[in-house]
Amino acid sequence: MSFYENTLITKQDLPKSELSKIKEKYNNLINDNSGKVIKIEEWGLMSLARRIKKYNKGFYIHYKFEGNKSTLEEINKKIKIDASVIRHLIVKYKNLDTENEYFKKTVK
């Protein structure tokens, strides 16, 4: 099995309950398709560099997981039909960095 990171950008106008459903949906999807979620990070609502499907902002959810080809195929299939997700990116890694969280909100 290989290590992957999957970043989802969802619509900015979704309620919190819908965001938690999306987060849980893809967590279960990875775990049910011979994968293992190592870490989930919620980066929050951030501005997009360019407009995507008439949205200037998006809510970012970042998964770090272990999986195989069938896991990736299932994720891509579900994301294509999910109207709440406006963009996604899956990147393969040799080793995952689970220590650092780059978009963590700092308390001042």
Image (cartoon, rainbow, N blue to C red):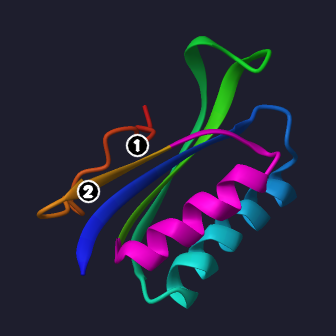
> What's under tag 1, amino acid-wise?
Lys
Q: Position of residue 83 (x, y in %)?
A: 82, 46
Q: Quadrant of residue 34?
A: bottom left
User: Is residue 69 a member of the stretch shown in magenta?
Assistant: yes
For the magenta stretch, what is the residue range? 66-88
Q: Position of residue 39 (x, y in %)?
A: 39, 69
Is 30 drawn above or below residue 86 in the view shown?
Answer: below
Q: Residue drawn at (43%, 31%), measured in percent from left and top?
A: 108
Say what secondary structure mark 1 lies in.
loop
**Residue type highlighted by circle 2:** Lys
Q: Is residue 32 magenta?
A: no
* Residue underneath mark 1: 104
Which mark is drawn over residue 92? 2
Q: Is residue 58 found left or right of 21 in the rendered image?
A: left
Residue 79, horizontal then vertical, whole percent: 67, 55
Q: Residue at x 78, y 54 (%)?
A: 81
Q: Nearer the viewer, residue 41 or 52?
A: 52
Q: Of label 2 and label 1, which has the lower sequence position?
A: 2
Q: CA distance from mark 2 to mark 1?
A: 22 Å
Q: Is 86 left or right of 91, judged from the image as shown?
A: right
